[in-house]
């Protein structure tokens, strides 16, 4: 069900690389079949972001057939020089994404900035302009594009498939300033889940609902302050792109 502060957009690109972390062990990269929750959250934050709010990805609709292509690349080796690797990308991708935002309850210092209408309409305007920052489909070499759309509009490649299991998949990271669970406060946590695409649509569980979790490391939240409507880093300069 669409929420009052929801936005829906089409996400397209010539190629995408939503890296399966298992494939990184050999120095190469192999993409998941669909975008991760974390990658979509990154797209939303490129459209519009403030530390006052947290984007929640609700649903993903896969419009184009899932196709992959491989390319030989020469990434920089940690020991110096270059090495040879094979990266496997998704080709010619198109998705529909529905998401909404909630207030970041770990930021009581920014409670004065919790104006739902203001943030919603700023996000809508930013989406209509293609986002405030460059859109990437997993990695920087994969340029993406966004525009408003009807989530249920058009014909999707998997609309007639009742179920399409996608196995175990990385969901996203829970950062220290977004943690809901007490045991994850001041921690960086990785989340995993078992997505199932039904008639072309994947419904994501909320971050706190993911049952497979692992705490990676201790980490303290970044500090912000609120001054005359501008969000600034504590002890740092103003972030112009975060201000209205």
Image (spheres, grey):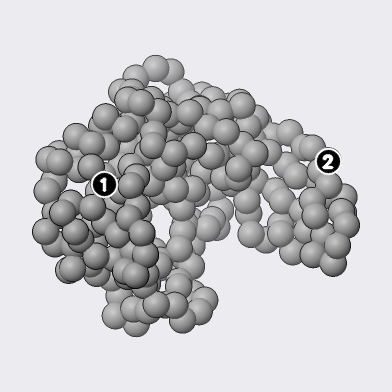
Circle 2: element type: strand
**What count of labels does the image hold?**
2
Asked which quadrant contains residue 10, the reply is top left
Q: Is residue 32 visible?
A: no
Instruction: Tell me if residue 157 comes above or below residue 59 in the rendering.
Output: above
Residue at 79% across, 64% down: 78
Residue at 65% across, 39% down: 141
List the residue tagged with mark 2. 72
Circle 1: element type: loop
Quadrant where the image shows the N terminus: top left
Q: Residue 222: where, in percent of width, then height?
A: 37, 69
Q: Residue 174: where, in percent of width, then height?
A: 40, 66
Circle 2 residues within 10 Å: few <14, some 14–19, many ≥20: few
List the residue tagged with mark 1. 243
Q: Is residue 220 visible?
A: yes
Residue at 78% across, 58% down: 27
Q: Residue 94: where, in percent of width, then height?
A: 50, 27
Q: Are marks 1 and 2 in contact (CB under 8 Å)?
A: no
Residue at 39% across, 37% down: 132
Q: Measure how far apart labels 1 and 2 are at the Cα level.
A: 41 Å
Quadrant where the image shows the C terminus: top left
Observer-side mark, 1 or 2, equals 1
In the drawing, does residue 77 fall left or right of residue 156? right
Q: Residue 33: where, in percent of width, then height?
A: 59, 42
Circle 1 residues within 10 Å: few <14, some 14–19, many ≥20: few
Q: Earlier in the sequence, mark 1 or mark 2?
A: 2
Instruction: Tell me if residue 32 comes above or below residue 207 in the rendering.
Output: above
In the drawing, does residue 123 fall left or right of residue 202? left
Observer-nearest of 134 and 233: 233
In the drawing, does residue 27 fall left or right of residue 111? right
Give the numbered dot on residue 163: none
Observer-nearest of 203 and 57: 57
């Amino acid at each position: 069900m669409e929420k009052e502060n929801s936005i829906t957009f089409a996400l397209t690109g010539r190629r995408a690389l939503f890296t399966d972390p298992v494939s990184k062990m050999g120095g190469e990269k192999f993409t998941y079949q669909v975008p991760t929750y974390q990658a979509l959250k990154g797209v939303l934050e490129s459209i519009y972001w403030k530390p006052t709010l947290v984007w929640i990805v609700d649903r993903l609709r896969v419009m184009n057939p899932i196709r992959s292509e491989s390319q030989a690349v020469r990434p920089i080796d940690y020991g110096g020089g270059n090495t040879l690797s094979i990266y496997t990308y998704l080709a010619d991708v198109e998705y529909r994404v529905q998401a909404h935002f909630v207030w970041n309850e770990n930021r009581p210092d920014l409670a004065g900035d919790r104006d739902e209408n203001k943030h919603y309409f700023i996000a809508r305007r930013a989406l209509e302009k293609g986002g405030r920052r460059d859109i990437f489909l997993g990695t920087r070499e994969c340029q993406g594009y966004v525009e408003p759309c009807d989530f249920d509009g058009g014909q999707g490649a998997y609309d007639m498939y009742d179920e399409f299991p996608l196995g175990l998949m990385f969901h996203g990271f829970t950062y220290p300033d977004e943690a809901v669970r007490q045991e994850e406060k001041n921690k960086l946590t990785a989340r995993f889940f078992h997505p199932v695409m039904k008639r072309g649509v994947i419904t994501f569980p909320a971050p706190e609902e993911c049952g497979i979790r692992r705490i990676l490391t201790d980490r303290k939240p970044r500090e912000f302050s609120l001054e005359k409507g501008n969000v600034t880093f504590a002890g740092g300069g103003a972030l112009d792109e975060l201000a209205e």
